[in-house]
Amino acid sequence: MADLPLYPPLTEHVFYTKIKPQAEQMFLPLEVAHVYFYFTLRHFYAASLPGGPYLFTHKGKLWDFSPELKELGLSLQTPLKTARHHAPEAQIITVDFADYEAARDPWLQWSFQWFSHIQPHYPHAWYARLDLPLSWEPIAEDFQRFLRQQGMEGTWGGGWSQCTARLAARCGTGLVVTADTTESFLAPLPVHWLFPELAPALEALGIVNIGRLANVPLPQLYQQFGSDAEQLFKKSRGLDQEPFRSMQRPVTNWQFSFAGHPAFAGASPSAQQLQAVLLDGCSQLAATAQHSYQLVKEFRVMWSFAGTETCSRSFTLHAASQDAQVLWRRLQPHVPSKPPTAVELRVETWEEQVPEQLDLFASPPKAKTSVAQLAAQLQEKLGRHAVTLPVVPRREQQLNMWESQGL
């Protein structure tokens, strides 16, 4: 694959990247023993593209458009209202990423054949990390082969950071940027490639490319952009703002053979023994889901009986879970009365676990109603003689007074 526009191959485990925090050149040693890759698919959201011109939108913004509309001066930074004005005949198609989560699974499975660490970015794009200094040409060839097999188009790029790998993929398929070439690679790129939201403010200051942004000292960025200064400073130098969050490939099945287990010695399991074994299987799948931060949405049980008889059944949970008891309650009513010789549980659909949002601004607890206040309220509703006030000891009165004053 000699025609790939590859940068010099990675041969070192320690690289140095140039940064200029305050107009003076410094060298920051970085322990780099891996390469990041960014894979992206084009037109993943359309099984068959419309015959005429089209505009794809996502969250009220222009996401993609047909190639012939480039002659009208459209770009991905063009406001949607402007794009519709210049191309009134174009078909408007809204993209919802939630509808394409399942279509991503075959590509993640392909990635796990080459990489041990995957981080999904979009349903059509993901990061991968190569921990060994191996040649990436076989990976590129296999990616192109899988694209042709699926009838799709896609690009990929590599770099010593996630940020650089994503920009390399945008420049063209097969571009791999090493640490020593990162500065020269980033310098001419437009700022809106990295910072689409902040690009208007940056361009108003005359900062139109990443090279100019990398020369701005950090204190000046804080004065102009406040809390966004840190990400501007790091990403303009090819540094990642957030660490790589690896998606572990969960084990998808658990199986148990009664015929080959010494505890049963060829005998059929009792109902209690079968229940204990199935509970253990559900616990194993639940533990796998918890360790990999995944949720079980759909799983299948497969039974084997004496001879060649087999049967299976699929279960879909109303709400994805990683609780063993939830899996067991769904499975329990369908346990066969005939003793099996083997059983297998297989997860067919995983869902990513969304972390719970902590409420840091919870409302303060309400003050407790004292006995006297409660009695007064009841007297007002039921009459003065309907409720007799209890005699509260002096010590209790003092405690209530301290509690009401927050002492």
Image (cartoon, rainbow, N blue to C red):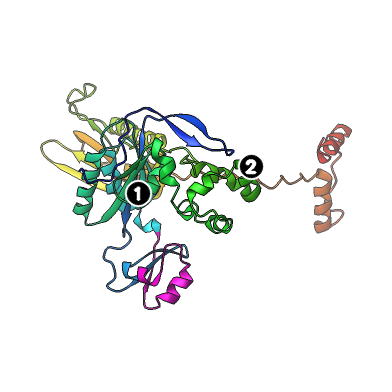
- Does 384 appear above or below 270? below
Q: Between disc 2 and disc 1, whose residue precedes?
A: 1
- Residue 324 seen in the figure: no
> Badge 2: how crowded within 10 Å, few (<14), some, or many (20+)?
some
Query: x and y percent of residue 184 in the render?
Result: 42, 43
State the image quarter where residue 256 is shown: top left
- The residue that label 1 is drawn on is 169
Query: x and y percent of residue 398 in the render?
Result: 87, 34
The amino acid at mark 1 is Ala
Instruction: Please tell me whether residue 92 belongs to the stretch shown in magenta.
Output: yes
Residues rendered magenta in the picture: 70-96
Q: Cα distance, mark 2 to mark 1?
A: 31 Å
| Farthest-out residue, right | 394
State the image quarter where residue 159 is shown: top left
- Does 133 appear above or below 177? above
Query: x and y percent of residue 111 in the render?
Result: 29, 42
Q: Which mark is residue 212?
A: none
Q: Quadrant of the C terminus?
A: top right
- The residue that label 2 is drawn on is 219
The amino acid at mark 2 is Pro
Of residue 256 and residue 50, the one placed in the foreground of this image is: 50
Q: Residue at x 39, y 41 (%)?
A: 294
Q: For the residue labelled by badge 2, is the local secondary structure a helix, a strand or a loop? A: helix
Instruction: Please tell me whether residue 82 belongs to the stretch shown in magenta.
Output: yes
